[in-house]
Amino acid sequence: MKLYLDMDGVIADFFGHFEHVHNLKHWKDHPDAITAIEAMKNTDWFNKLYPFSNSGWLVDQCRAIAGRDYGICSSPIAGDLPNSSYWKRVWLDRHGFLPEIPNLLFVEQKEKYAAERLSGEPNILVDDKPSNIHKWNKAGGIGLLYQANENDVDELISDIRYAYS
């Protein structure tokens, strides 16, 4: 069983940085967020994000629970896979969150990794996007919805431990 953390909204404050850059109270207040996200392509956007205050604690706990099966499963900006992946990896490495390389996934269809290919054993995904959790669960995995700026990290860690037992 692998334990994957999403990055944006889980350990990296994508939306907080977006609000700061665009001088917004909430990212949804942007009149054209899609165009603003498109403008992030081929930039070092992901390298500029801050971790949440509890990101280190969450990653440490996930490593303690999953050991070498700790991983990252994060989506790139659509149409920007090589660039987004590069800067996300730089960010993970700089903050000490980089998993072993086989457990580092930058993919658009996360649900393809919901279960181990040979054994069918479910993998865990912690993600802030409900549709990702729904697809992950439907594909046979264990999806845990978590938004770092809204949810309790200790409750999440308890849920992860329960899933591992």
Image: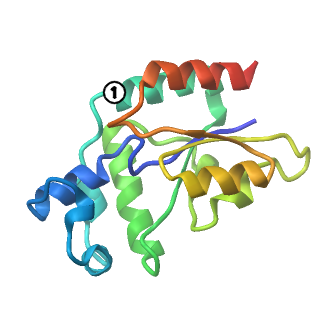
Nearer to the camera, 92 or 11: 11
The amino acid marked with disc number 1 is: Asn
At mark 1, the secondary structure is loop
Residue 141's place in the image compared with 135, above or below, is above
What kind of colouring is applied to the model shown? Answer: rainbow
Residue 77 position within the rendered picture, expressed as x and y whole percent measured from the top left: 42, 71
Name the residue at 78% across, 55% down: 139
Quadrant containing the C terminus in the rendered view: top right
Name the residue at 29% across, 40% down: 51
Name the residue at 75% across, 45% down: 141
Q: Quadrant of residue 54?
A: top left
Nearer to the camera, 143 or 74: 143
42 left or right, relative to 120: left
Name the residue at 54% across, 27% down: 62
**Label 1 Cα crowd, 10 Å radius (few <14 / some 14-19 / many 20+):** some
Number of residue marks = 1
Residue 43 position within the rendered picture, expressed as x and y whole percent measured from the top left: 26, 73
Q: Which residue is mark 1?
A: 54
Nearer to the camera, 69 or 113: 113
139 left or right, relative to 97: right
1 left or right, relative to 86: right
Residue 112's place in the image compared with 156, above or below, is below
Quadrant containing the N terminus in the rendered view: top right
155 left or right, relative to 4: left
Residue 26 position within the rendered picture, expressed as x and y whole percent measured from the top left: 21, 55
Q: Quadrant of residue 147?
A: top left
Farthest-out residue, left: 23
Residue 153 position within the rendered picture, expressed as x and y whole percent measured from the top left: 43, 25
Residue 154's place in the image compared with 41, above or below, is above
